Image (cartoon, grey):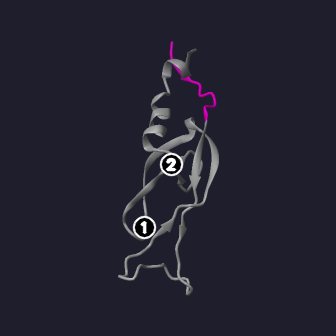
């Protein structure tokens, strides 16, 4: 018999980050004295609960102004256009994804 995937909700709580571009008084991206961009401030956070089964992609987050990776990950959720930026480690989220087991999710029909 064929197996049908049945995905019961699997909720986890993550720390969502709201990257805010640091700007000067004129509204331009802030730079250091030697002209290096300061990039995003990552100090505004909130708890968010999401269904692990809705995660379709996971990767590192790069500051588009400095071109450097920062201590944040981005995840894409099914049905959501933009990535969610989170503070939780790549390994933590990947472990949740790896724990999805077809023997737990699939039923004979």
Marking on residue 46: none
Q: Residues within 10 Å of mark 2 (few under 14, many from 20)?
A: some
Toward the viewer: 2 or 68? 68
In the rendered image, which quarter contains the C terminus?
top right
Marking on residue 75: 2
Residue 94 picture location, percent across and down: 45, 37
Q: What is the tally of numbered marks visible in this picture?
A: 2
Q: Residues within 10 Å of mark 1 (few under 14, many from 20)?
A: few
Region of the chain picked out in magenta, as a range: 1-11
Query: Is 32 covered by the magenta stretch?
Result: no
Task: Relative to 89, say whether 33 is above or below.
Answer: below
Identify the secondary structure beneath mark 2. Answer: strand
Residue 83 picture location, percent across and down: 53, 54
Task: Relative to 33, say whether 108 is above or below.
Answer: above
Toward the viewer: 99 or 78? 99
Task: Relative to 87, say whether 51 is above or below.
Answer: above
Sequence-first tag of 2 and 1? 1
Residue 61 picture location, percent across and down: 44, 56
Characterize the magenta stretch by its predominant secondary structure. loop
Labels 2 & 1 near each other (Cβ < 8 A): no
Determine whether, in the image, residue 34 is placed left or right of residue 52: left
Residue 11 picture location, percent across and down: 62, 35
Q: Residue furthest front?
A: 33
Res 53 → quadrant: top right
Res 104 → quadrant: top right
Q: Residue at x 47, y 38 (%)?
A: 92
Residue of label 1: 64
Toward the viewer: 50 or 105? 50
């Amino acid at each position: 018999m064929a197996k049908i995937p049945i995905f019961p909700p699997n909720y986890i709580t993550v720390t969502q980050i709201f990257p805010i571009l640091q700007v000067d008084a004129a509204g331009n991206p802030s730079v250091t004295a030697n002209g290096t961009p300061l990039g995003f401030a990552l100090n505004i956070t909130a708890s968010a609960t999401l269904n692990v089964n809705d995660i379709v992609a996971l990767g590192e987050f790069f500051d588009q102004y400095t071109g450097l990776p920062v201590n944040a990950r981005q995840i894409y959720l099914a049905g959501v256009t933009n990535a969610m930026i989170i503070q939780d480690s790549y390994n933590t989220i990947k472990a949740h994804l790896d724990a999805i087991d077809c023997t737990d999710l699939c039923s004979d029909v």
